Amino acid sequence: MINVRVIRKNGKIRGFLTEGHAMFDSAGKDIICAAVSILTINTVNAFETFLPEEKTEVEVDEEKGRIECVFAEEPSERAVLLLDTYFLGIRGIEEEYGRDHLKLVD
């Protein structure tokens, strides 16, 4: 199962931790893993491309299917909008395919 955890500090969103594998299908055919990977990587790329002044700390462990992305400081409204958009996509996948394969924890 993929777990996506909202990271908060003092009640405010600071980033996310995504880890695990959906096990929906075999490697290379798992549409849930593919969808979550695309959303996650695109979100990290968006931070780096559109908000380079906001420092993020990104840790990746491909073998464990783990990506952690945390803002060093409180994120701007634009960054929070991108985070909210990411969580909206994750929730959509979770609702469509069920919590047996993907779980968003806030």
Image (tube, grey):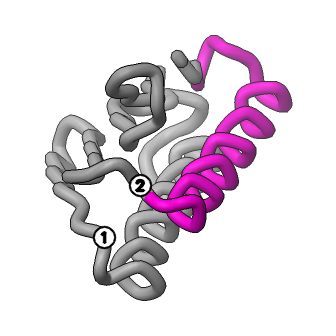
Residue most extreme to the top? 100
Q: Is residue 100 above or below residue 90?
A: above
Image: magenta residue range = 76-102
Res. 29 visible in picture: no
Q: Is residue 37 above or below residue 17?
A: below
Is 54 within the magenta?
no
Cα separation between marks 1 and 2:
7 Å
Residue drawn at the location 57% of the way across and 36% of the way down: 25
Q: How many marks?
A: 2
Q: Residue at x 40, y 76 (%)?
A: 45
Q: Residue at x 26, y 40 (%)?
A: 66
Count neighbours of disc 1 (C-alpha within 10 A) and say few if under 14, some if 14 to 19, many if 20 or more. some
- For label 2, the crowd category at 10 Å Cα-Cα, with few meaning under 14, some 14 to 19 and many 20 or more, is many
Q: Quadrant of residue 39?
A: bottom right
The residue beneath circle 1 is: 54
Tell whether 81 sits left or right of 17.
right
